[in-house]
Structure formats: C-alpha cells, structure tokens
Image (spheres, rainbow, N blue to C red):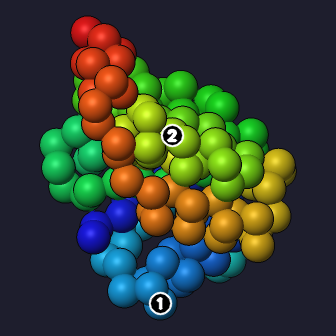
C-alpha cells in the first residue's frame, strides 16, 4: 500500500516517526513534507498547502491513503477535504480512526502533533489501517457526502 504523508512545521517529527513505523510494516511511504533543511532548520510551511497537495495525491490515485499532521489536525484536514474524492477525518484516538474507515470510507486521517503523542499516534494509525469499509448502508451515506 502507498501512503502519503504531509505536515506543516508543527508535525515534522511525528510525521518522520510514523513514516519509519509504516515503512517497517512494509508500506511504501511518500513524504510530501515539510522537513528540515540541510542545516537542520525547520522549513516553515502553511498547513493548507500540504493538505491540498496530499489531498490531490489521494484523489488522483498517486497514493492509496494519507496521513496529515499539523498542530491540531483540524486545519490540514479541512484543506484536504476541499478536494473532490477526499474524505479526511481528524482522529485523536483509535476508535474514531477505526470508525472513520468502517463507516465513512475515510482515505485520509489527520491528527495534531500537539494533541497526540508518538505511541498514541501509532495506535491511531494501526486502528485506521486495520479497519475495512463496511459498505452496505454506509455506502449510500458516503455517496451523499460525495455529492
């Protein structure tokens, strides 16, 4: 599975931890940034830019799913959700991540680096990627969201 990662300057460290974690699990990870420059300085970035860029990658099929991180997870997910075909959910605990996939067929999860720590972020990611869309009555609702 190809997973895209994007963040603003608040989420760099957590993004890099999760890229390593998901790579170890056998996934192909695409890093859309932001990162540190060659001097170790943070490359500042506005979260709407990364939300849009990664949302486009998901919508075009360049990646299967994505993980977005900013300070709270809210702004970057709102930006991604402006892209047709994107269903980004902010998840601060594993249950919401699981249900975002099961009932809403989410293709992006987002969270805040200032909200969740490293181990909780891993649990959220695992819950999301271990879940499957249930379809059925939920498929009709997802179609309504898309309209």
Q: In screen coordinates, is 100 left or right of 40?
A: left
Whether residue 121 is visible, yes or no, is: yes
| Mark carried by residue 97 | none
Q: Quadrant of residue 60?
A: top left
Which is nearer the eye, 100 or 122?
A: 100
| CA gap, disc 2 and disc 1 | 24 Å
Q: Which quadrant would residue 124 be assigned to in this image?
A: bottom right
To which quarter of the image does residue 27 belong? Answer: bottom left
Q: Nearer the viewer, mark 2 or mark 1?
A: 2
The picture places residue 28, in percent across and down from the top left corner, at: 31, 77
Question: The C terminus appears in which quarter of the rendering?
Answer: top left
Residue at 44%, 45% in the rendered image = 101
Lateral position of residue 27 relative to residue 75, left or right: left
Q: Which residue is at a point 57% across and 61% down the rendered structure image?
A: 127
Q: Of 113 and 101, which appears nearest the observer?
A: 101
The residue carrying mark 2 is: 100
Q: Judge by depth and name the residue closer to the eye, 143 or 82.
A: 143
Query: Which is more toward the observer, 126 or 23?
Result: 126
Disc 2 is placed on an element classified as helix
Residue 140, x across and y down, in percent: 27, 19
* N-term mark: 2 or 1: 1
In the figure, 34 relative to 123: above or below?
Answer: above
Above or below residue 93? Residue 117 is below
Q: Check the image and report above or below for 69 versus 76.
A: below
Residue under pointer 1: 24
Q: Left or right of 76: which side holds 84?
A: left
**SS of the residue at dot 1?**
helix
Within-10-Å neighbours for mark 1: few <14, some 14–19, many 20+: few
Taking the view exactly as shown, the residue that stands out farthest to the front is 136
Q: Position of residue 84 (x, y in %)?
A: 26, 23
């Amino acid at each position: 599975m190809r997973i895209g990662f994007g963040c603003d300057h608040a989420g760099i460290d957590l993004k890099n931890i999760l890229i390593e974690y998901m790579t170890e699990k056998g996934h192909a990870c695409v890093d859309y940034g932001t990162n540190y420059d060659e001097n170790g300085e943070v490359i500042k970035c506005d979260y709407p830019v990364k939300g849009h860029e990664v949302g486009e990658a998901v919508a075009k099929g360049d990646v299967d799913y994505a993980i977005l991180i900013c300070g709270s997870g809210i702004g970057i997910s709102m930006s991604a959700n402006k892209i047709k075909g994107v269903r980004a959910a902010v998840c601060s605990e594993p249950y919401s991540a699981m249900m975002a996939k099961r009932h809403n067929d989410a293709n992006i999860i987002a969270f805040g680096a200032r909200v969740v720590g490293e181990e909780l972020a891993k649990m959220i990611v695992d819950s999301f990627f271990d879940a499957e869309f249930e379809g059925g009555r939920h498929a009709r609702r997802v179609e309504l969201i898309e309209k």
